[in-house]
Image (spheres, rainbow, N blue to C red):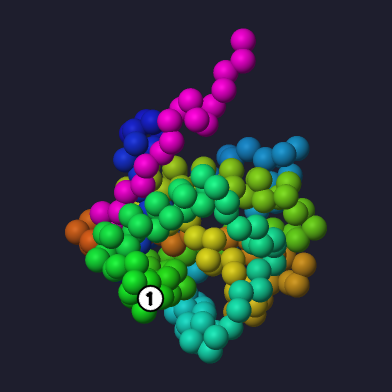
């Protein structure tokens, strides 16, 4: 598949088969993702891939925090609130998701349970946490975004789906504790990945893209 074909077919998957990816294939995929470009070739990403028992321990800790009413305390600035057309697109995305799983706007419990699925990794067999030294700030965040998109494309080339999740950066403390990360390492965001459960209603969610003319201006 070409990159264009992958981009046309790709969508965020939120229900996965319980089929782990072989370690040899993971090694190949993450080796290829290392070719991602970065500013001055600093390659700031420190990626933590969790599976099996480690993933389950993290899931239990996340759900314990959330059920206990904990508030997010991200390592990086997640404070800005979407406004205007960005807010409208956010609502459109949420509406597409909840419509696919039959949860109405008034069903607050249903929406809360759907949100909790983020910290259950959507039952994916694997998850990646994208981390970097905190001092890198916005420059490091740009590089991590480039790396994550590169990784997503390489995964798709092998028939493996994913869901990028800002939610996995909202509670960094259990991640740092379980994985033994130093305090100076920040968790920016994460990604659940694996083979998709194609018939799951949630995986019928599709979102639209704005017109080229609304996103790109060409200057001659």
Residue nearer the viewer, 215 or 127? 215
Horizontal side of residue 129 vs 7, given as left or right: right
Which residue is located at x 66 percent, y 62 percent?
Answer: 79
**Would you name the residue on which mark 1 appears?**
108
User: Percent position (x, y) of residue 144?
Assistant: 62, 50
In the picture, measured across the screen, residue 24 lies left or right of residue 172, that is left
Residue farthest toward the top in the current orientation of the protein: 220
What range is drawn magenta here? 203-220
Residue 207 in magenta stretch: yes
Question: In the figure, is residue 73 to the left or right of 202?
Answer: right
Residue lying farthest bottom?
68
Q: Secondary structure at mark 1?
A: helix
Q: Is residue 60 above or below residue 80?
A: below
Most common SS among magenta residues? loop
Q: Quadrant of residue 106?
A: bottom left
Position in image of residue 9 (x %, y %): 32, 40
Residue in the image at 52% along x and 31% along y: 215
Residue at horizontal 73 percent and vertical 46 percent from the top: 139
Q: Is residue 89 visible?
A: yes
* Image quadrant containing the N terminus: top left
Front in this rendered view, residue 63 or 6? 63
Q: Is residue 212 above or below residue 25?
A: above
Q: Could you say which quadrant of the image residue 16 lies in?
A: bottom left
Q: Residues within 10 Å of mark 1 (few under 14, many from 20)?
A: few
User: In what quadrant of the picture does the C terminus appear?
Assistant: top right
């Amino acid at each position: 598949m070409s990159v264009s074909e992958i981009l046309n077919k790709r969508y965020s998957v939120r229900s996965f088969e319980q089929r782990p990816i072989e370690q040899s294939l993971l090694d190949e995929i993450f080796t290829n993702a290392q070719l991602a470009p970065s500013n001055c070739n600093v390659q700031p990403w420190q990626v933590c891939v969790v599976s099996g028992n480690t993933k389950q321990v993290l899931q239990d800790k996340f759900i314990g925090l959330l059920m206990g009413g904990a508030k997010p305390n991200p390592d990086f600035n997640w404070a800005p609130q979407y406004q205007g057309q960005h807010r409208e697109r956010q609502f459109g995305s949420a509406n597409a998701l909840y419509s696919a799983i039959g949860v109405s706007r008034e069903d607050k419990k249903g929406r809360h349970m759907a949100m909790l699925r983020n910290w259950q990794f959507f039952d994916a067999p694997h998850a990646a946490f994208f981390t970097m030294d905190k001092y890198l700030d916005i420059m490091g965040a740009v590089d991590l975004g480039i790396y994550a998109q590169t990784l997503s494309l390489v995964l798709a080339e092998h028939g493996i789906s994913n869901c990028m999740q800002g939610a996995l950066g909202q509670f960094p403390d259990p991640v740092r504790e379980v994985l033994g990360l130093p305090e100076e390492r920040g968790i920016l965001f994460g990604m659940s990945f694996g083979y998709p459960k194609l018939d799951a209603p949630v995986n019928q969610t599709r979102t639209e893209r704005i017109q080229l003319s609304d996103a790109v201006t060409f200057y001659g």
